[in-house]
Amino acid sequence: MTSGRQRDHGDPGDAPSAPPPLAPVANPRRPSAAEEARTIASSTNIGTLATLTAAGDPWASFVTYGLLGGAPVLCVSRMAEHGRNLEDDPRASLAIVAPSTDLDPLASGRITLAGNVQRPAGDEQIAARQAHLAAVTAARYYIDYSDFSLWVLRVQRVRWVGGYGRMDSAAGEDYLGASPDPVQPLAGPAIDHLNADHADALAAMARALGGFPDADGALCTGVDRYGLDLKVTSGRGIAYTRVGFTHPIGSVEELRSAAVELVRQARAAEGPVEG
Amino acid sequence: MTSGRQRDHGDPGDAPSAPPPLAPVANPRRPSAAEEARTIASSTNIGTLATLTAAGDPWASFVTYGLLGGAPVLCVSRMAEHGRNLEDDPRASLAIVAPSTDLDPLASGRITLAGNVQRPAGDEQIAARQAHLAAVTAARYYIDYSDFSLWVLRVQRVRWVGGYGRMDSAAGEDYLGASPDPVQPLAGPAIDHLNADHADALAAMARALGGFPDADGALCTGVDRYGLDLKVTSGRGIAYTRVGFTHPIGSVEELRSAAVELVRQARAAEGPVEG
């Protein structure tokens, strides 16, 4: 499932390493790179645009954006350098970083959406304007200034980095066809609850379903429509694994029953506990 | 003082507008664009790099950086697209956004530093490595991987945007010669104190020194080595102005006496209050 997602660095030998699983992971399904990227794009309204100057140099500049079916909608002034750049050459890419509280900035998810910008017209112009205003409230003060233009980025290729060692590319059409995760952005309180009140159940999942039969404990570090990310502690050290729901869930309201089902599976696999 | 800093948009007529001052601002000195940019560069360790792909397309990607005398020091892998891009073409720019709690993302300060990257060598290599590690703690885990390289961005030109209507360009040498503001990043508690306990003094400054003799009140919105930014309320609406210190200050410890001096000047200009 993760082939192509990980690459080996030329490790000088002193980086932290994680013990491998001792058994197959029961259901390792996780969001695709296209889905991860679509979720990150929906997680904020700010990014950095790369455009080309008149000399063909790369120009990075802060922008706001809305989303029209996954396509970023920019509203920029031609009095700004990036606005002039786009008028002269439509090639552009947009880097977006998922909001994170992690102290290590490289642990956070981020994407690059690359393609060409185009001025929307007709019905799409109206939809693009609404999409930008819905995401960027303050744009109502300048969106109708004559020097501002709306641009839709036609995404052709996508690069997603989920943090250390998690990365992949996606085609623009797969990104545009993906839906943002309905669970992940809202799962914070559920994660806190799982870790505070169901530590034993998480450890059982890690042992029976996550490939770590020697797990002493487990913390949930993320939830998405397909399952849970677990940080596992064992006598061999700290590792990360995955337990997948039986079926993808469509909302955070379905999380409780899906988690209960995982616990049931884990307990059944572990068998009755001897007194 | 602000010529070249502001531009008129093609205003459709419904944007918020601010009343102008009724008197000259006594000392409007504020940080130069080069100084503003240098302060923003020092305010964080993350930015977005624009590079050129093999096809000459602009590629935006998240990076961490340290600073070596104002020059960004990157540490990137050639297994990442931006790393390969830099090896093929040294042209690059780095967009940096100052950390902000403002709900309107376009109210925050940001810069673009543009130039060419170069691999540091000799003593500079050692200094660049230290500069990156000092800013990015986690880099110790990968900085010596054989696929990672240090790059120093030789800054040739700088664009600074301080928020709405505050923007200017600077030459790379002016940016590199500027020092980050010694006061602004540490001024938060002092600003809170001024606003909580010295509202009358701020209003007096706005009336006597800030060009708003009709000010009913004033809030301090920022402090730097050269003075205070004030948000002024009067019967004509809300406006923004500036009161400058007699001399630039070198640390946040000097702020109290510099502010006391401004109050003294303001009270003297306003004259004795009639019983």
Image (cartoon, coloured by chain):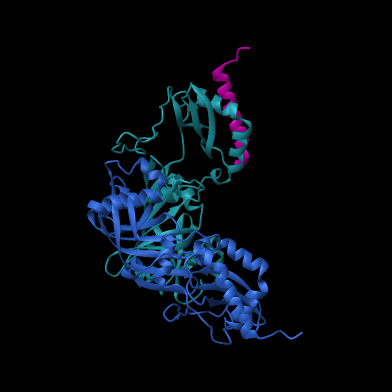
Chain colours: A blue, B cyan
Write the residue at 47% across / 69% down: A162
Write the residue at 34% across / 70% down: A174
Asked whether the viewer can see residue B73, the reply is yes
The picture places residue A152, in percent across and down from the top left corner, at 29, 56
Left or right: where B161 falls relative to B219: left
Asked whether the viewer can see residue B246, the reply is no
Foreground residue among A233 and B76:
A233
Q: Is residue B134 magenta?
A: no
Q: Is residue B178 above or below residue A15?
A: above
Foreground residue among A48 and B55:
A48
Secondary structure, magenta segment, majority class: helix
**Which image quadrant: the N terminus of chain A?**
bottom left
Give the quarter of the image for residue B264: top right
Write the residue at 37% across / 53% down: A65
| Residue numbers of the magenta segment | B251-275
**Which image quadrant: the C terminus of chain A?**
bottom right
The picture places residue B215, in percent across and down from the top left corner, at 50, 24
